[in-house]
Amino acid sequence: MNDLSTPLALVAAIAALVGSFFFLAGAIGFVRLPDFYTRIHAPTKAASLGIPLMAFASMLVHLGAGLDLWVEDALIILFVFLAGPVSTQVLVWAAVARNIRSSSETVGQSVFRPIELVDVEEGPTDDVGPHGTSAES
Amino acid sequence: MIDQFGVATAALLVCMAMTLIRSIAGPTVFDRILAVNSFGTKTVLLIAVYGFLSGRPDFLDLALVYALMNFIGTIAVMKFTRFGDLAGMEEDEEEIL
């Protein structure tokens, strides 16, 4: 894989390196951020950008090698695009339902309003997770 | 074998080490579940990248299975954590929320 002569291999190399950069940024954020709600965004967002890039690099390599394995790469991208946001969302719902405390640095800036302040007429409540469903019931 | 995919593999291994640190140190159970989830995500890519680094691209099938397993595992653990049950979520939902 060391020759970067063809443009296909060059694009694959750039995609793999940029993808691993995103992964590194996400992991650093995951270790250093103060509370759960800030921590969850770093690796998940980085992964939903890093995985397609690296799988795209793998797809290009397999295309360049004349293999038929690009279908697997496409399926990996598809499943990660479907699964990553869903599992992140479910994780945050569960954390909110269990009242995980946020750090004092982010109190007052939270996107999650307290459960007694949720108003049905206030706007779309579908995107605020468990509070939205509780406001409707 | 220092090429771009070797660098990507090394970066993935560093990421997995950091994720492992968080999964050990994480104060809440959700940090640990998130760490396990993103560790699994990185494992998918590590399998894929190592597969064509070592000239065995058939590893991609394993990576695909691992991606599915990771997703279903996270959803199952989350459902259990939130509702205390893997079935019958409707009546529990009213009670918790």
Image: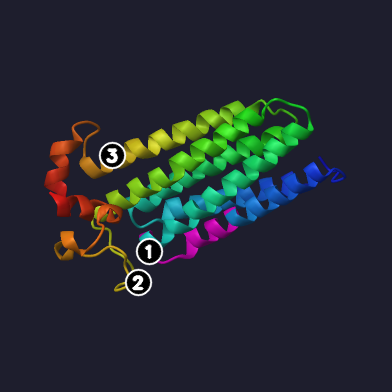
Residue wearing tag 2: A106
Marks 2 and 1 close (CB-CB < 8 Å): yes
Q: Pinpoint residue A118: horizontal percent, then vertical percent.
A: 18, 62
Q: Is residue A1 above or below residue B28?
A: above
Residue wearing tag 3: B79
The kind of residue on which mark 2 rests is Thr
Viewer-closest of A129 and A22: A129
Q: Which residues are magenta?
A: A23-36
Whether residue A3 is visible, yes or no, is yes
Q: Look at 50% across and 36% down and name the residue there.
A: A79
Marks 2 and 3 close (CB-CB < 8 Å): no
Q: Residues within 10 Å of mark 3 (few under 14, many from 20)?
A: some
Q: Is residue B91 found inside the magenta-colored segment of the image?
A: no
Q: Main secondary structure of the magenta part?
A: helix
Viewer-closest of B30 and A110: A110
Q: Look at 15% across and 48% down and name the residue there.
A: B96
Residue wearing tag 1: A35
Mark 1 and mark 3: Cα distance apart in space: 22 Å
Viewer-closest of A7 and A83: A7
Q: Pinpoint residue B11: horizontal percent, then vertical percent.
A: 65, 51
The quadrant in which residue A76 appears is top right
Q: Chain of mark 2?
A: A
Q: Chain of mark 1?
A: A
Q: Is residue A34 found inside the magenta-colored segment of the image?
A: yes
The kind of residue on which mark 3 rests is Lys
Do tags 2 and 1 sit on the same chain?
A: yes
In the displayed structure image, the side of residue B52 where residue B88 appears, left or right: left
Mark 2 and mark 1: Cα distance apart in space: 9 Å
Q: Pinpoint residue B40: horizontal percent, then vertical percent.
A: 50, 40
